[in-house]
Image (spheres, helix red, strand yellow):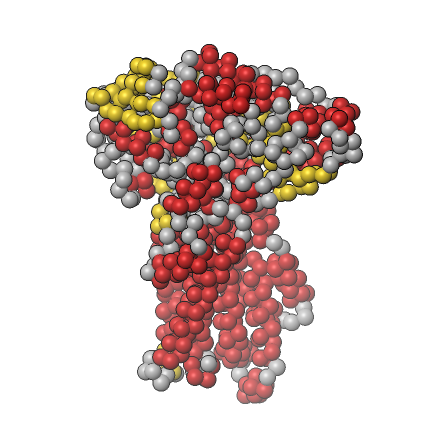
Amino acid sequence: MKTFLAKRIWQTLILIFGAITIVFIVLRAIPGDPALLMVGANATPAEVDQVRIDMGLNEPLWIQYFQHLWEVVQGDFGESWRLGGDALAITLSRLPATLLLAFYAFVLTVALGVPLGIYCSRRPGTIADRIVSVMSLTGQALPAFWVGIMLILVFSRWLNLVPAVPDGTFKTSILPAFTLALPFIGWLARLVRNGALEEIGKDYVRTAKAKGLAPGVIFYVHVMRNTLVPIVTALGFILGNFIADAVIIENVFSWPGIGSLMVDSITNRDYAIAEATVIAITVAYVIINLAVDLLYFAVDPRLTPETSS
Amino acid sequence: MFQRTPGGLEINRRNFMFLTGAGAAATFLASCGVGGGTTEGADRALKAVFSQPITDLDPHAANTAVDEASLIAKYLIFDTLVRRNGTEIVPSLATEWKQADPTTWVFTLRDDVSFHDGTPLTAEDVVQSLKRIQSVTSAQTPLWAPVLSAEATGTSTVTFKTDGPLGTLPVNLTLLFIVPAASANSPDFFANPVGSGPYTVASFVPSSSLKLKRSDQYWGDAGKVADIEMPYIAETSSAITSLSTGEVDLLWPVPADQVKEVEAIGDATVERIPSYVYYFNWFNCSRPPFTDANVRRAMWHALDVETIVSTLYGEGAEVMTAPIPSTVFGYAKQEPYRHDPDLARKLLKEAGMADGFSTSLMWFAGTGPSATELAQAMISDWAKIGVKVEAQSIEKADWLQRLNTLDWDMDLQTNTVTTGDADFTLGRLYTSAANRLGYSNQELDAVLDKAHSIAEQPEREKLYAEACKTIWDEAAGIFPASIVTAYGRRKSLEGFVPVASNQPDLSRISLNAK
């Protein structure tokens, strides 16, 4: 287990280093000058140059890169020129809102996806099964930003059931959480259904039946347990996606999380915040993946770090 | 069912599941306590939604020096020496001011003003605030560069020295917010700033939300409502929804194509006022064929400006009659360029381009309402006189970079006369020294320079009229439309006054209980 963890942490560090480097290169490769955005269209070239010097943007790129790496190692992502403050602190202050939304969406996905999948796997080929199947494909096909706007229109504007913008109450998180969860509810349902159906055809189920076990016991105690490994993988993937998808959803719903912060920072070439948000999302993703890997050993005792890696 | 791993770490499956679940539940429960609900009834907060986020509350920060969203908040938290009332400059912290000699201004301050923390506001705070804003390079830098020094010549008198006559000093001072000298330079000061204005900061999340609380010790008329909230709502449709459900009391500017939606809301109404914001289509006058004024005029005559503006904006914009909006000090009405494609072709022929020419137009979509549609309408009119214009809809950051390096043929954008004085735009953009659009005219330079320095307002007005005429007749750019701001508000609001600057005084508004 120790070697496993060491290996994973090493991989994580390489991944984060890669992310820092890619973000650094991409942000500077795209046209646009933060100094100019800062002083605006009315500034004279001399004023812009002064700001560039103040911001350290006139140093050669490779010097900026190594300075940046050294600072990041020390946990210093620099100051946000736009929001005026420590970039990492601002990013971290926005993280709970994103995690909270991801958590709600996750609960919603599991609470709807798993029962739906079980329901369908127990009556494959029926009309109910097909309806769920079609709906899950539709849910995956609809673009999230469109779904979000439609939900606001129907549930806030027309029905006036929930506020359109977040005010810190649970009510206002229902629509964004549902928008985030929608494509994955159907996906998870299909995964549970197909996984269960595959297991049902296996020999041990026939044996269990022959022993005279009740169908419910066979399904929930034996079949579901064996279906868990792919589901855990999927859940990790889903949770990771919820954090990444926040970039779109948060803007539609004015959710004060890391996604809306990231979009704003990239549009305004606020390098410090852009880098801090990307790294924060990367780290969150990696941690979730690590948790999933650990969860494998818990759900399937046959797996050990050695056999799996 | 224990999984014993070689490292000695024990993971029990049920325990693992239990702990994960317990952790999740704890997060959930903790999160339910986050934030508070909206308060109902007469003591609820005034919720005002502007289309831009407030990113910073430091009134001297480089990035928000002329940013409308943060200025709205800064006027509530801080004070300035003087304020603008229409085209007039009226007392605020300063009770009176006079020009002792052409390069010396003396301002007398009120002596009964304290900051929110109780320390009295003195002349020294004014001096330090000026020093503070002069120490950063920002969009305000040109306003303060001519000011050599400010000196506290008494506890309540401040003397400003300028490097030459500076008639615009009082106007410029409407943008100098006074902060407490003693604490303003501590690093966290502006996360929760202390000012002397009618409101104090209750909480602030940059570019997300600002909550203000009425100050009990304000020297002037106390704010009408106890609490003001300014949330940022990125999606206009969500903001309109919030206005319709009563979560939001005031929303501006409402885009022209969504005004009808707001008007359809029973409890809401729309008020319009011509703003300081306007569109211009600059020519790069240093690049052929736009070096020729007749080519530029031909481009203008090719446009059916009236039809374009009325179709695209309806009541949301006005056809311009000067290179600055009619609401700005220094405006002087000019003779419109009539829509005349034949004349345009004739002018092109005289310039040796009977078959037209190819050029390009750059803009970024967010510059103003329906920017892309406006660009396309103009491009299709130009095509009719044989001028092929490549549409370059680019990202803001890219656009700014090209704009500042004069790397463009034509540039379509909005501009804002932040101070409401022609000096802010004409005086800064059209001089040969500024070289913003490759246009150079020494006579115009002289006029703008004089208008910048003298203090007599009628004389300044005359000079800007002259400048307006030159820029207009020379067609340094095309000036199609000035934007009319539409404020959507709950009918129950009282005391709301729409203003051209997009910065209404929220402290004067009261909520009538429903």
- Percent x, y for residue B109? 27, 20
Q: Residue at x 68, y 21 (%)?
A: B337
Q: Residue at x 51, y 42 (%)?
A: B234
Q: Nearer the viewer, residue A112 or B467?
A: B467
Residue A173 in view of the camera: no
Q: Is residue B472 left or right of residue B157?
A: right
Q: Residue at x 54, y 36 (%)?
A: B240
- Percent x, y for residue B443? 54, 20
Residue B134 in view of the camera: yes
Q: Nearer the viewer, residue A299 or A7?
A: A7
Question: Looking at the rendering, which quadrant does residue A304 occupy?
Answer: bottom left
Q: Residue at x 50, y 16 (%)?
A: B463
Q: Is residue A71 left or right of residue B433?
A: left
Q: Quadrant of the N terminus of chain A?
A: bottom left
Question: Looking at the rendering, which quadrant does residue A131 occupy?
Answer: bottom right
Residue B173 position (above or below residue A68)? above
Residue A208 position (above or below residue B305)? below
- Percent x, y for residue B487? 52, 28
